[in-house]
C-alpha cells in the first residue's frame, strides 16, 4: 500500500538526509528535505507538513528549536527527532518539547523507521485549518 503523505526531513548530514528520504520515498511517501533548521523553517512557513523528521544537533537553529517553531506554527504537526547523542536527557527534552518519538542514529533498522513514521501519521487527527 502506497502512502502519499508529505514529510519534511531535516538533517545537516547529506548521507543521513538522503538515506531517510530515499527509504521513505521507496515506501511511497512524498519527501522534501532541508539541510538546516533555518532552511526547514523557511520551507515549513511556505507549506506546513503533517510530519517533520529532524536531527537534534544542527547549526544555529537546532532540531529542538525547529520543533518548538513547528508546533507554534502548526500544533497538529507530528515531529520525530533523531540524534546520535542518545542520552536520556535528549530523549526527555525532546519528548517534553512535544516530539512524537525519538530515533537513535545511526538509523540501521529500516522497518523501525517506517513503522515509526506510519504510527506518527496514524496519530494525526483531521483538524480544520484556521480561518
Image: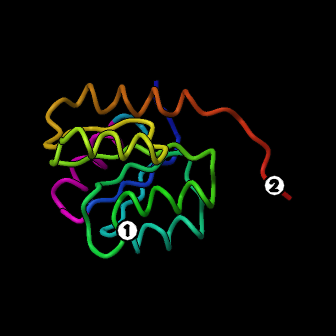
Q: Residue at x 59, y 63 (%)?
A: 47
**What residue occupies the far front of the structure in this picture?**
89
Q: Is residue 50 left or right of residue 93?
A: right
- Among the 4 quarters of the image, the one containing residue 48: bottom right
Asked if residue 117 is positioned above or below residue 84 in the image, the reply reads above
Residue 78, percent across and down?
A: 51, 43
Residue 9, percent across and down?
A: 37, 54
Q: Nearer the viewer, residue 130 or 71?
A: 71
Which residue lies under the disc numbered 1? 37
Q: Nearer the viewer, residue 68 or 35?
A: 68
* Total numbered circles: 2
Q: Nearer the viewer, residue 32 or 130?
A: 130
Q: Give SS at disc 2.
A: loop
Q: Earlier in the sequence, mark 1 or mark 2?
A: 1
Residue 21, percent across and down?
A: 31, 49
- Stretch in magenta: 12-26
Which residue lies under the disc numbered 2? 130
Asked if residue 62 is positioned above or below residue 121 in the image, the reply reads below
Residues at marks 1 and 2 touching, judged by CB atoms closer than 8 Å: no
Q: Give SS at disc 1.
A: helix
Asked if residue 77 is positioned above or below residue 103 in the image, the reply reads below
Asked if residue 66 is positioned above or below residue 53 in the image, the reply reads below
Q: Assess whether residue 77 is covered by the magenta stretch.
A: no
- Among the 4 quarters of the image, the one containing residue 33: bottom left
Magenta segment main secondary structure: helix
Amino acid at each position: 500500500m502506497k502512502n502519499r503523505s508529505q514529510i519534511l526531513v531535516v538533517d545537516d548530514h547529506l548521507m543521513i538526509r538522503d538515506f531517510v528520504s530515499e527509504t521513505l520515498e521507496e515506501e511511497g511517501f512524498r519527501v522534501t528535505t532541508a539541510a538546516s533548521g533555518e532552511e526547514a523553517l523557511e520551507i515549513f512557513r511556505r507549506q506546513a507538513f503533517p510530519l517533520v523528521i529532524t536531527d537534534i544537533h544542527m547549526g544555529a537553529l537546532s532540531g529542538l528549536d525547529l520543533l518548538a517553531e513547528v508546533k507554534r506554527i502548526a500544533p497538529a504537526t507530528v515531529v520525530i527527532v533523531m540524534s546520535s547523542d542518545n542520552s536520556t536527557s535528549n530523549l526527555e527534552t525532546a519528548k517534553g518539547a512535544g516530539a512524537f518519538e525519538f530515533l537513535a542514529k545511526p538509523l540501521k533498522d529500516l522497518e523501525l523507521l517506517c513503522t515509526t513514521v506510519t504510527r506518527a501519521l496514524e496519530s494525526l487527527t483531521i483538524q480544520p485549518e484556521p480561518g
